[in-house]
Amino acid sequence: MCGTSGDSACTAQASALELDRACSPSVPRWGPVCRDALRCPPLAPRARSCSSSVGSIPSWARLVLGFGGLGFLATGGVGLWTRGRPNENPRDPVRSTRERAAVGRKGISESGTFGPPVARRVEVVVIGAGPGGYPAAIRAAQLGKKVLLVERHKLGGECLNYGCIPSKALIHAASVVRTIGRAAEWGIDTGPVHVDVSRLQAWKTAVVDRLVGGIGLLLKGNGVDIVFGEASFTGPQSVRIRLGDGSTEDVEFDHAIIATGGRPSDLPAFRFDGKRVISTKEALELREVPQELLVIGGGVSGLEIGTMYAKLGSRVVVIELLDQLLPGMDPEVVRILARSLRKLGIEFHVTSQAKAWREEGGKAVIEAETPEGPVKVRADVILVTVGRRPNTDGLEADRANVRTDAKGYVLVDQQLRTSNPRVFAIGDVIGQPFLAHKATKEGLVAAEIIAGHPIEVDYRAMPSAIFTDPEIATVGLLESQAQETGHRVRLGKVPFAAIGRALTAGEPDGFVKLLADEDTKVLLGAQIIGPDASNLISELALAIEMGATVADIALTVHPHPTLPEGIMESAEAALGQAIHVLNRG
């Protein structure tokens, strides 16, 4: 298996393919990502699939998934997969990707005779193996397509390797430290807590490696061919893949899915250097907890990582250019979060701008403009989280007649087609919101459309979660958005302080708020800030997807004592029937 001491060839190959990538989520902003005649996914109308056929999944895969999905599958590495791939004919021996490339370069046929170089032909090529790309490849294979998946770095992409998973692992550990620090509130006396950052990072890496291995096994089990290299278009139905050794392989396709993702943006005065000025990737790989951390950008990733390091002992300062943290979020939610950040000792400045920095006395000294005047902040590390840019440079999209906007984002229609009807694009590369689960859903939908199934994504039921303290989760419309679209809004809101389970967990801050149409009582949106919000929001996403009313939710019995009772009680409040809070007139 790759990465074991006995497999030096595989380890060397993996090292040779290392590329520097990073991941940073952002606050969902439900606006257009394209222009002209092409229509934007966030504005797509609701529609349902007219076909649920997804082909057959091997019985062993169904069994393994039933025992816990990727975590169960990942007992092995991906080394057996990176060294070779299954042939299209399962009776043929496994051929390495380099051997396949050599066949194309030298013009040697499968029978061993010489001839002109012949490009490999596939039905679907997926460029990028992140949370959008690898599910798209698997679903296309399940639907009977011959699929080639091209990844320039690691399976799972930036979300799994440098973002979603490693950040949540470290956030969990930081929350444990915080809980131990509060234990005296419950009569539990503890000694000083010491965090061994090296062991913490090793545990985080083991979690990531286990999931990466699981993806490799899933791809292999579904018959997906993988090539590690960097793909660029050479025509409307062809790509060239540059492999790690510098050689190339040409591939012709019937359809392609662009799933190349994005990367963090820096600022002219704060260029990433990987040491003093860092992106989220480096922030999740620090070998010691910084004494002082400056975060430029008060969005999702900046506040998640800032909160994490504050719990681990850092003094954290956040500078946000706009007039509130988490721009675009419900102001009532932000007020509760700001109060919690202050309790953690986090200092933040809104309507402020970091202007420049310099080295002084072994620290970075940052100059910033705030409404109160200029300030200077000392920091060991400057974390820049001001947005993302698409990974379309080097893709040569114009050669495939694929249009991009001025920032490089790929333009798509309601069904994720680009200006080339044989090429689709999904995930961060088509713009906001930057959500891994959005990319996954888009990948599955793109594969279904390629297979001829009439389907599109329903973005109205797309939830988002922010792993601050307390957690925040939303789905559907905000109150202001509902009013702008012509709805008369009925609200139901219940604080967690009225929910017994929240009090027993020592987490009374926050609330559940539901928005329904005044006339139909259909649920339009929901916002949760409080304990376990990231898990609670799924019930409300389902409710919006199925067109449920607040009465449907209120009539659903929720077990006691649990946090989901807050959802039921909020639905009752929207009907004027709440038991544990006073009903509004």
Image (cartoon, rainbow, N blue to C red):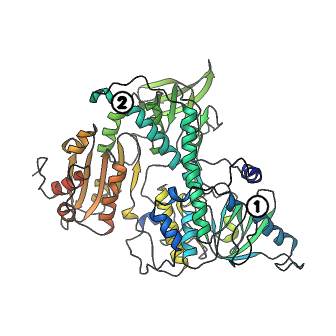
Q: Given the image, on which type of amino acid does mark 2 rest? A: Arg
Q: Given the image, on which type of amino acid does mark 1 rest? A: Arg
Q: Which residue position is annotated with label 2?
A: 342
Whichever of labels 2 and 1 marks the residue nearer the N terminus, that label is 1
Give residue 499's position: percent from left, percent from top: 20, 45
Q: Which residue position is annotated with label 1?
A: 242
What is the residue that sits farthest to the top in this orientation? 361
Identify which residue is drawn at 17% across, 63% down.
555
- Element type at mark 1: strand
Q: Disc 2 to disc 1, how far (Cα)?
A: 50 Å
Nearer-the-camera pick, 187 or 228: 187
Query: Which quadrant of the structure image shows residue 153?
Result: bottom right
**Circle 2 Cα neighbour tier, 10 Å, few/some/many (<14 / 14–19 / ≥20):** few
Q: Quadrant of the N terminus?
A: bottom right
Identify which residue is drawn at 56% across, 56% down.
74
Above-or-below relation of 523 to 171: below
Identify which residue is drawn at 84% across, 78% down.
109
In the figure, is residue 211 to the left or right of 318?
Answer: right
